[in-house]
Image (cartoon, rainbow, N blue to C red):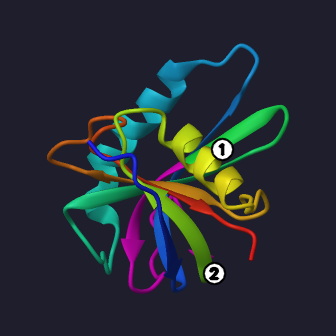
Amino acid sequence: MSNQVELISLQEKRFVGIPVTSPFQDHQPERIDETRQIFLGRRHEIKAIVNPQEYVCPHFTSEVLFTYFFCMEVSEISDVPSGMIGFTLPAHLYAQTRSDLDPYEVIHSFLRDISMESNSRALAFEVYGFDNPQWPSQVDVYVPVKE
């Protein structure tokens, strides 16, 4: 598996899905798993799906909490199912990799090497295939970069 990182400009993306927020201290991974199961059971309710073979997990953190979303990318945000959220990520430059190692460490090391840094105000995201959602070796990770 390659640890190669690419810089990629992506256009605006729209998502509909289910969020889960958890504290770093006393983290409860079962909450994340429970939300994933709910999402998998309800994904058919989401309209205008761009790629039915994959789901996307945007996320953000603070010093105390992190919020993780289980989403489908959609061509338009309409008829958001009850208990779900729809939102748009603006166009950004991303560092992207797929790695057997920690992809976030691989990306941050790459960015340091080229004197760039991640944009902590923007959302990073992970793209999983429904057929093989194996972390980390089968997941594409995108980290927004300060331009």
Residue 91 painted magenta: no
Q: Which quadrant is home to the C terminus?
A: bottom right
Q: Along the polypeptide, which appears first: circle 1 or circle 2?
A: 1
Do we see residue 23 in this rendering?
A: yes
Residue name at image x 39 percent, y 46 percent: 3
Asked whether 20 or 146 is in front, the reply is 146
Residue name at image x 30 percent, y 75 percent: 49
| Residue 106 in the image: above or below residue 78 | above
Count the labels in the image. 2
Tell me the crowding category of disc 1: few under 14, some 14 to 19, or many 20 or more residues within 10 angstroms, Cα based: some
Relative side of 110 to 13, left or right: right
Q: Where is residue 27 in the image (x, y as percent from the top left)?
A: 65, 19
Residue name at image x 37 percent, y 42 percent: 99
Asked whether 23 or 139 is in front, the reply is 139
Verify CB contact (< 8 Å) between mark 1 and mark 2. no
Relative side of 12 to 114, left or right: left
Do we see residue 87 in this rendering?
A: no
Tell me the crowding category of disc 2: few under 14, some 14 to 19, or many 20 or more residues within 10 angstroms, Cα based: few
Q: Where is residue 74 in the image (x, y as percent from the top left)?
A: 39, 77
Q: Which quadrant is home to the N terminus?
A: top left
Find the residue positioned furthest to the front. 113
User: Mark on residue 67?
Assistant: 1
In the rendered structure, which segment of residues is drawn in magenta?
A: 69-90
Residue name at image x 62 percent, y 45 percent: 109
Residue that mark 2 sits on:
90
Find the residue positioned furthest to the top. 26
| Residue 109 in the image: above or below residue 121 | above
